Image (cartoon, coloured by chain):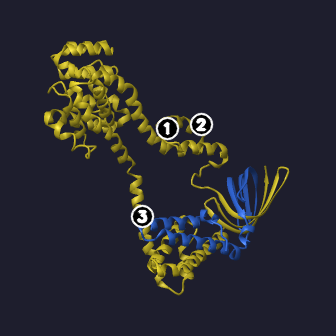
């Protein structure tokens, strides 16, 4: 199963990465097993988003920068608004990084 | 909001459990299950600290099987994190100490070579040590220099001052032994007094206090003037010659005068280089060092507010060291809007795209399975549609 390392940059992914870094530096963990944990996180996070999350969000804003490289879209929006059932947020600037969903199904 | 954050938290907790359970075999056959427990605890603590997971929910509802055990696990990791954090904090604070060592090295290293050579041979080496000591060690130089004349040897004064300062305890040992012997009492007393005053004043401003002290002796104009007076103080007998040099102010005249006198000769070479070196490079360096530190601290703040302010700061920093500020500023220029009150907040959406289309300047995209970090809150979505104007 293919996975994205994309979600490692999320809060939960960063927390895990920091934890693994500490434990590897302590000598508690070997780098190999730390990588295995990260790979498992990639799978678990992707699966959880696919199966456990049902909410929908609409995003609007001024597109400041767009980039498509290596099958990854990157958008930088200005004055972006996010709307979902529960919340509405507005930010001056936001970065969107999106991988090609079709790569996962391969 | 409450709903979304709650669901986010629960999803995160389930992800954590899923990951932990699926790597358990690896740990059992490897580092052991205790390590896995530690990993989970640390991870969860970090998540709670990040405000994206609520520990209560987890311990209460999530793990019925282990029951109480999970609570223990949570606590244990907590301590672990604190341990890690504490060192970090210490490391952060040290910057002040770090500066001291950096500065001290200059005086310590330079003075040794400089002091010895000073009397006999070349003015250049002597120059470096003197300024270095003065700036770094809190402008002890003047004191040291004044001391020189009395006993007859220059080096003793400098080292004593350094040692007397008490600042660089580490540095104390090496220089003291040779130098201290020559003139312990005088230099120590003077140094202590000066040091105290100067420390308060700080390095940057310290010049003035020194000047003031010496002002009484001399007219007290500039550094050059100050130094000559100091020498005068030390060797009262020689007053006329030294005065002449000081009055003359010109480097050449000073040199010529000193060679003529026996005692002055040693002093003579020192002051000249002092004036030149001190006035230009040393001051800049020290100011630069001090300013760097402050700049680094200050830089973040200015960036948020204004682009112009950081630019000014950059100039100083550029000469000295780090390019990081530049990069940050560049980003700021590009990103303009982002720098609001929230530096730490980096709004980020991580997702997969199903489709991205563009019609003229209007972009539409369909995203799925995303994690959004918006305004310090994590929001998950299954589907998202984006409409952007370029």
Q: Earlier in the sequence, mark 2 or mark 3?
A: 3
For the residue carrying disc 1, how many other residues have a C-alpha within 10 Å: few (<14), some (14-19), or many (20+)?
many
State the residue position of label 1: B317
Say whether disc 1 or disc 3 marks the residue closer to the N-terminus. Answer: 3
Q: How many marks?
A: 3
Mark 2 lies on residue: B308
Give the percent coordinates (x, y) of residue B368: 73, 67
Chain B shade in the render: yellow
**What is the drawing colour of chain A?**
blue
The residue where tag 3 is placed is: B84
The residue tagged with tag 1: helix, strand or loop? helix
Q: CA distance from mark 1 to mark 3?
A: 31 Å
SS class, disc 3: helix
Tell me, yes or no, whether the two marked residues, 1 and 3, touch with CB atoms within 8 Å. no
Residue A42, located in which quarter of the rendered image? bottom right
Q: Tell which circle, 2 or 1, labels the residue nearer the N-terminal end.
A: 2
Image coords of residue B110 (percent x, y): 29, 35
């Amino acid at each position: 199963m293919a996975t994205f390392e994309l979600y490692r940059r999320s809060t939960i992914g960063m927390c895990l990465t920091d934890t693994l870094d500490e434990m590897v530096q302590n000598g508690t963990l070997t780098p190999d097993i730390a990588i295995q944990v990260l790979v498992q996180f990639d799978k678990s996070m992707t699966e959880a988003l696919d199966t456990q999350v049902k909410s929908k969000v609409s995003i609007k804003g001024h597109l400041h920068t767009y980039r498509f490289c290596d099958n990854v879209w990157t958008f930088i929006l200005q004055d972006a608004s996010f709307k979902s059932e529960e919340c509405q947020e507005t930010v001056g600037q936001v970065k969107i990084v999106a991988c090609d969903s079709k790569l996962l199904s391969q | 909001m409450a709903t979304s954050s709650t669901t986010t938290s629960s999803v995160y907790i389930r992800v954590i459990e899923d990951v932990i359970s699926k790597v358990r075999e690896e740990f059992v056959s490897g580092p052991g299950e205790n390590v896995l427990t530690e990993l989970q605890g640390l991870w969860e603590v970090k998540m709670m600290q990040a405000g994206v997971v609520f520990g209560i929910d987890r311990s209460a509802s999530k793990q019925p099987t282990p029951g109480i055990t999970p609570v223990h696990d949570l606590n244990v990791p907590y301590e672990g994190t604190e341990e890690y954090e504490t060192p970090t904090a210490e490391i952060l604070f040290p910057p002040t100490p770090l500066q001291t060592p950096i500065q001290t090295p200059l005086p310590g290293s330079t003075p040794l070579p400089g002091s010895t050579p000073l009397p006999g041979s070349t003015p250049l080496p002597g120059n470096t040590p003197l300024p270095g000591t003065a700036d770094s060690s809190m402008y002890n130089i003047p004191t040291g220099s004044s001391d020189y004349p009395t006993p007859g040897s220059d080096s003793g004064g400098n080292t004593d001052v350094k040692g007397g300062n008490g600042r660089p305890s580490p540095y104390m040992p090496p220089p003291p032994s040779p130098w201290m012997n020559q003139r312990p009492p005088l230099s120590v007393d003077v140094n202590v007094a000066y040091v105290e005053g100067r420390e308060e004043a700080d390095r940057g401003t310290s010049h003035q206090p020194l000047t003031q002290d010496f002002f009484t002796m001399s007219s007290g104009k500039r550094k050059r003037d100050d130094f000559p007076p100091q020498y005068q103080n030390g060797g009262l007998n020689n007053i006329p010659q030294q005065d002449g040099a000081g009055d003359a102010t010109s480097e050449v005249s000073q040199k010529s005068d000193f060679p003529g006198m026996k005692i002055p000769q040693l002093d003579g070479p020192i002051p000249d280089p002092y004036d030149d070196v001190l006035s230009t490079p040393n001051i800049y360096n020290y100011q630069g060092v001090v300013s760097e530190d402050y700049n680094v601290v200050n830089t973040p703040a200015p960036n948020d507010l204004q682009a112009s302010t950081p630019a000014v700061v950059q100039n100083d920093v550029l000469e000295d060291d780090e390019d990081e500020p530049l990069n940050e500023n560049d980003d700021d220029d590009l990103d303009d809007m982002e720098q609001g009150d929230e530096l730490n907040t980096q709004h980020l959406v991580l997702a997969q795209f199903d489709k991205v289309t563009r019609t003229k300047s209007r972009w539409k995209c369909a995203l799925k399975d995303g994690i959004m970090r918006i305004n310090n809150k994590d929001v998950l979505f299954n589907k998202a549609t984006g409409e952007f104007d370029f």
